[in-house]
Amino acid sequence: MRRIFLIAIVLFLCGSVYAQETIIPISTSNNLMLLETSPDGRLNTVYFGEPLANESEYAAVSRGYNLRDNNSAINNATYTTSGTWNLVEPAIEVIQSDGNTSLELKYVSHTAETTSDNAVLTTIVLEDAQYEFQVKLFYKAWANENVIEQWTEIQHKQKDAVTLKKFASANLFFTGNEFYLTSFGNEWAKEMQRNEEKLTRGIKSIDSKLGTRAHLLQSPNFILSFDGKAAENNGTVVLGQLAWSSNFRYDFEVDPQGNVRFIAGINPFASEYELQPGEVFKTPGLVYVVSHNGTGEASRNLHSWARDYRVLDGNGERLTLLNNWEATYFDFDEDKLTALFKDAKELGVDLFLLDDGWFANKYPRNGDNAGLGDWQENKKKLPHGIGYLVEEATKEGIKFGIWIEPEMVNPKSELYENHIDWVIRQPERPEKYFRNQLVLDLSNPEVQDFVFGVVDKLLSENPELAFIKWDCNSVIYNAHSAYLEEEGIPQTHIYIEYTKGLYNVMERVREKFPKVPIMMCSGGGGRGDYELFKYFTEFWPSDDTDPLERVFMQWNYSYFFPSIVTDCHVTDWSDLSLKYRVDVASMGKLGFDIVAHELSENDLAFAKQAVQNYHSFKDVVWHGNQYRLVSPYKNDFASLMYVNDEKSRAVVFNYLSNFRYMQTASVLPVKFAGLDPAKKYTIKELNVYPGRRSRFDTEKVYSGDFLMKVGINPHITLYSTSVILEVNEVE
Ligand code: DGJ
């Protein structure tokens, strides 16, 4: 039965019809996008900005902007076609079934459906008058969070297949003076490095061609700022991501007047799609948030949206953990692991996570060159199986989780020997490996069954298994599918079918195991996208756990992801103090990847206390509102804070990011944010290292007004490189 608000959905022809023009508003509480038909029936974007007070003035907008002349150099089409009148980068490119390469889309109709008290889904139908070809544009707008998700559905009724050469999810048009784009990327262990640049005439493209993931060299996360560089507390920004776990492409095209056309979608690279009559091709969603008050507000809104509407169990709890990867790598046995269970218990974390290396017998997984694909416990390392480990962990009073990488195979494996036809490879060419492995062909339903089976077997045989780390290390080389060949499906479908296959598997996993937390991990931070977050509870941002690097990396990820999904582990990646490492990891979901019983007495005492503290404030970090106070990109330290909805509790993280003595003398008071100016607060330093005294007087009472206007000096020095402050309302 449909719920009341769904029954109450009013399908209505929205917008106003002025003479021949139809105007379609896509609005959220703080933003308005106006789409308008031209006299010849094309659909154009005529406004994107702060809401207009008077609906009656919507019709006057396009005249003011002079954007209706089809001969002008300005192309503000809402979904730009090719092969007819358009001279700029198209959103869609097709070869009709008779070989003709032209497409013209005109407005047919639209509906707006209220899908909840906070969201409206607008659907616009565009069609070609010459060819039976239709595109539906979808805009789902969440009012309170100012988030929009845009996608399209493409179909036709021609006799034979139509070739889709390009098929964008969104084609946005922005007017403004100077646009800056902040994009992110780099390589393994250097993920999410930022680059801010002014967009100049021509096209700036960002794309990826990795196949199994969107992210690494170029990330799909972007910030577009209007009229200058992106600022934290002022200015218009659009900030978002294509929710697609494979190749993507963005084109930012600046026209002669300085307007920007932004086209986002699946990367058309090597991906021509043969669309059969009646088949519906649904593109992934472009998720973006709009703010006219800078990136801080935009991120807070995106975080709320993600927790409320996208991330699996986004408002729930998470498990702190001890992972054995960096403690043992592949070299472990039952005794070593059970000793680590004791460490987990001693530290006070919730779970022990067994990483790579626990499986395969004919080709034991003792390194990354063998065994992947053979998901049976290695009898030498684990003679009593996973069940025994789960039991032992439970006896110790902790939960147990496990690592898998079910989409991949080592050529040195029984799986490869038995099912070479399941492997993505060019049969006639030498194989090319990424971390000694190849990718299984998820376009093949049998492979989907196999991958689902890996998870199903583990969770069915071990119902107490409490966590999964799902890794995905290899990209796709030599993209060729034996299955597609067999089925007579073009090889150019492979990237799309792979990704859909992955989503099919995840659907099945979640249908059977709706709750178990699963981390997505991909050769470090290669996966973190808002489509997979429908199925995953968290992600691994990078194998680089050097805390100083993490200060910058977590800062950049924080634009797009709430803390509750960002897994941060304490490791031995750097010589910086344990306190600094723990303090940095405490800003996300805390984990450890160290040998705790080898810590010094003071370090162990500190770590135990820090875990207890974390449990006491994690609720604020996971579910609260985040304020980036001091940027490490502009200062010698970073400050971020999280405030609960009631504004009664906050946690402020401060980290030195430049270790030169000359720099540290200049730390100034940090102005807090998000508090209630009328409330009174006390401040207490947390995670104080044994033997040190805090410089903060816990008795002193401050008004929120003072803390936000004058602020508090966090006393970051070379001898106190990180400071965590807890702010509590005085009752
Ligand atoms: C890559 C991951 O990022 C690491 O954390 C670890 O799980 C290894 N894979 C295991 O092979």
Image (cartoon, grey):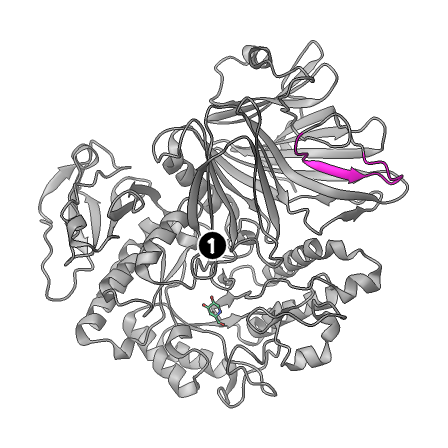
Q: Quick check: 578 left or right of 377?
A: left
Residue at 66% x, 82% y: name it. 414
Q: Give the percent coordinates (x, y) of residue 239.
A: 47, 38
Magenta highlight: main SS:
loop
Amino acid, disc 1: Asn
Instruction: Please tell me in which quadrant of the rendered image residue 58 appears.
Output: top right
Decide: few, some or many residues near mark 1? Use Cα within 10 Å; few <14, some 14-19, many ≥20: some
Classify mark 1: helix, strand or loop.
Answer: loop
Q: Quadrant of the N terminus?
A: top right
- Residue 597 visible from this viewpoint: yes
Residue at 33% x, 40% y: name it. 645
Instruction: Please tell me in which quadrant of the rendered image residue 168 appears.
Output: top right
Residue holding disc 1: 186
Q: Is residue 536 above or below residue 561?
A: below
- Residue 116 visible from this viewpoint: no
Q: Which residues are magenta?
A: 88-101
Residue 290 is inside the magenta segment:
no
Q: Give the percent coordinates (x, y) of residue 718.
A: 16, 57
Instruction: Please tell me in which quadrant of the rendered image residue 287 appears.
Output: top right
